[in-house]
Amino acid sequence: MHSVDDYVGQTLDEKYRLERRLGQGGMGTVYLRARPPLQTPPQST
């Protein structure tokens, strides 16, 4: 099992980085997440 703080700094689904833990309770943990800037140039569709 992972420590709660092990998830801080991790990237989920290659989209969201967990910045910090906001709260923890009986049903789970809530994190502040950020979406880093896209690394690919914009493309028209």
Image (cartoon, rainbow, N blue to C red):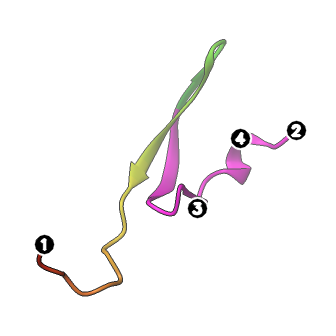
List x then y, in percent, for residue 19.
48, 55
- Residue to which mark 3 is pinned: 9
Marks 2/4 in contact by CB < 8 Å: the verdict is: no
Q: Which residues are magenta?
A: 1-22
- Closer to the camera: disc 1 or disc 4? 1
Callout 4, which amino acid? Val
Q: Report the residue marked by disc 2.
A: 1
Amino acid type assigned to the residue bearing label 1 in the image: Thr
Give the distance between the C-alpha atoms of the residues marked 2 and 3, in whole angstroms: 17 Å
Q: Identify the disc placed on residue 45.
A: 1
Q: Which mark is residue 4?
A: 4
Q: Secondary structure at mark 3?
A: loop
The correct choice, above or below, for 2 with respect to 27 in the image is below
| Residue 16 lies within the magenta run | yes
Dot 3 or dot 4, earlier in sequence: 4
Amino acid type, residue under disc 3 in the picture = Gly
Q: Which disc number belongs to residue 10?
A: none
- Disc 1 crowd, CA 10 A, few/some/many (<14, 14-19, 20+): few
User: Residue at the left extreme?
Assistant: 44
User: Horizontal and vertical percent for residue 17?
Assistant: 48, 59
Q: Residue at x 51, y 53 (%)?
A: 18
Could you tell me residue 3's position as x and y percent?
Answer: 79, 43
Image point (36%, 60%), residue name: 35
Q: Give neighbour class at mark 4: few <14, some 14-19, many 20+ (Cα, 10 Å).
A: few
User: Label 3 vs label 4: CA separation?
Assistant: 11 Å
Name the kind of residue labelled 2 in the image: Met
